[in-house]
Image (tube, rainbow, N blue to C red):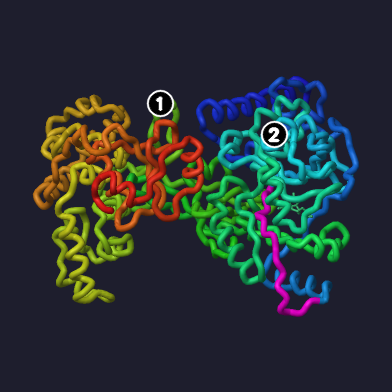
Amino acid sequence: MNKNLIKKKYKKKIELLTYYNRKYFNDNISEISDLEFDNLKREIIELEKRYDFLKSENSPQLIVGYKPSKNFKKALHRAPMLSLSNAFSEADLDNFEKKILNYLDKKKDFKIEYSVEPKIDGISASLNFKKGKFIYGLSRGDGKEGEDITSNLKTISDIPKKISYKDFPEDIDIRGEVFIQNSDFKKLKAKFANPRNAASGSLRQKDPKDTKKIPLKFIAYTFGFEKGMKLKSQSEFLKKLDQWGFKINPLNKVITGTKNLISNYKEIEKKRNSIDFDIDGIVYKVNNFEMQKRLGNVSNAPRWAIAHKFSANSGISKIIDIDIQVGRTGALTPVAKIEPVNIGGVLVSNATLHNEDEITRKDIRINDEVVVERAGDVIPHIISVNLEKRETNAKKFIFPDKCPSCGSKTVKDFNSLTKKEDAVRRCSSEGFECEKVSIEKIKHFVSKEAFNIEGFGKKIVEKFWNIKLVRLPQDIFNLDFEKIKNLDGWGNQSTNNLKYSIDEKREVSLEKFIYSLGIRHIGLENAKLISKYLKNSRNFVKIGERKNYLDLLNIDGIGETQINSIKNFFSNKTNIIVLEQLNKILKIRDSIEFKKDGLLANKTFMLTGKLENMSRAEAKSLIEKNSGTIISNVSKKLDYLIIGSKPTKRKIIQAKELKIKILNQNNWLLMLNKRS
Ligand code: IVH
């Protein structure tokens, strides 16, 4: 390739990278996956390495932490920075304890006390303090020799720079983990593959000013060399660290017995995705320092500690087929059928491919070997394709141009705001003409947030559809219960229950009614706004009859997208019939103006956790009925945080920091003179 061509190719890649960065930081849009972004960066860096005439101020080498380590002076650790051996199973753990008991010549029933500490997945650092002053800090390096990253560590506010407590050892290396919180990582996602890379990259910046830009945290958990420390156990040490002004892990515990270690492990693993930092396991350390000393080390790991690792959340599998699912709004969602693979104890055989663009971008093909990720409650998805394993005759996946359910043409909307085509392809037969769309619409109609018909779940909708009991929402209120009674698995009792829960819902608020219709872009909030404005269901029907959709533009929050969608809804004959029928069958309550001088006037509330005998929706409406306002963030604007059971801890901490009043359900109801 000639020089000009290389320059051109390089320039193009740099432009692309700058574009993705700008998109991410200015518009909050990730147009490509982390992996693809990383690949692009790598390609640029490789070109720069190969051709020294390639230079750009936007090079990823200049923007983020790809600094070679020769930027830093090396220094020896006064005590080696050890690593930990790993336990992956309960058996490994039992074995670990057995070995300790043997070594210490203790009986089987001897109870060992452990300091139990979630293992943060970050970068370890060793900080030297002399006479309470932070002197220098080293990275782990090879455990014997690390890099002097003092000036970068000094930018971290969690690291105390001067400690004046009398009991602070006169010379000590405090060790811990430098990391970045997941919430902060979100803002940097376009630049780094994961929080650990972000922490490592920024910690190794040449210019500490660049490190300072990234909100790094530090949690302390051990020490290296020390002179003048008089403590007896790890848990005492952790407590002292806290008093001396270091941050320690809030989930640290002291536990005895491997059974209890395991139940704690399971509990934390469940919480893992709701914690604001990545943890990849739990560290168990024999709590007593005397015992630790006796136990000593094996090669580069202590005998007295082990890391109980969490199971991986990704696995390798093969795509057997690609299914196209049709959703309520006609969106076609491709789903990969994969060879079943065990990921973190769950057998995964489906992975979402999101939309047509995602398949094109990742060039995913049937028979490809892929990496599948499953994290928390998120639907499993494909991370990457192993191109080396691709069969030479593998064909590109052609997205269907006809709806697999009704055969209508599939279309992609043009978004007038972004001036781009939607990533999602849809079935063009808006509404009840498409079987799959109809089924999904009915599922939506009976769902919790809509009519909330108890006992009428997704499976029942499908069953009733298959035996032609329901075709349109109004059919739900005209069900043939004699027929249902005789169905397999049904009887008098369950039929009566269903009848009762349907009858209970013959009266509905206007906003729920509008929401239940499942009009695209009209979610709960918009339905509420429309119902407040239109006041009663006659006015809603009139909008369609008189085609005066633009009148809805008077509503703050309703725009062109919503108006077009409502227009579409009314232009469909079946929808008009559904509306007419439902209006006949149901009692649709007018929207009521909430009084402005209620007991909670001028007060703002936020809810967290589960309330007793009351749904979230009911609590919200109770607040609004009494002139209170619901807000969705903890901020200075918030007056009261109402907490139920299992609240989000972060919200409580934030509320406490801002000195916001915290109420339990009873205290809150007392404000309404409701309960004592
Ligand atoms: S103790 C003496 N405690 O895990 C044992 N390490 O594989 C070594 N880590 O390099 C350190 N949380 O980066 C210890 N509470 C904790 C830890 C922890 C995370 C990391 C640390 C270390 C690696 C060992």
Q: Is residue 603 left or right of residue 633?
A: left
Amino acid type assigned to the residue bearing label 2 in the image? Ile
Image coordinates of residue 602 in percent, x first then y, are 29, 32
Res 417 label: 1
Amino acid type assigned to the residue bearing label 1 in the image? Leu
Q: Is residue 86 inside the magenta stretch?
A: no
Residue at numbered disc 2: 156
Q: Which residues are magenta?
A: 106-121
Q: Is residue 113 inside the magenta stretch?
A: yes
Residue at image location 73% in from the left, 32% down from the top: 65
Outermost residue on the front side: it is 166
Image coordinates of residue 147 in percent, x first then y, are 84, 38
Q: Quadrant of the N terminus?
A: top right
Q: Nearer the viewer, mark 1 or mark 2?
A: 2
Res 386 label: none
Residue at image location 54% in from the left, 58% down from the top: 270
Report the number of numbered marks. 2
Tell me the quarter of the picture where residue 91 sits.
bottom right
Question: How far is mark 1 from mark 2, CA to CA?
Answer: 41 Å
Q: Classify mark 1 as within 8 Å of ligand 1 or not, answering yes or no.
A: no
Tell me the quarter of the picture where residue 44 sits.
top right
Image coordinates of residue 82 in percent, x first then y, are 82, 53
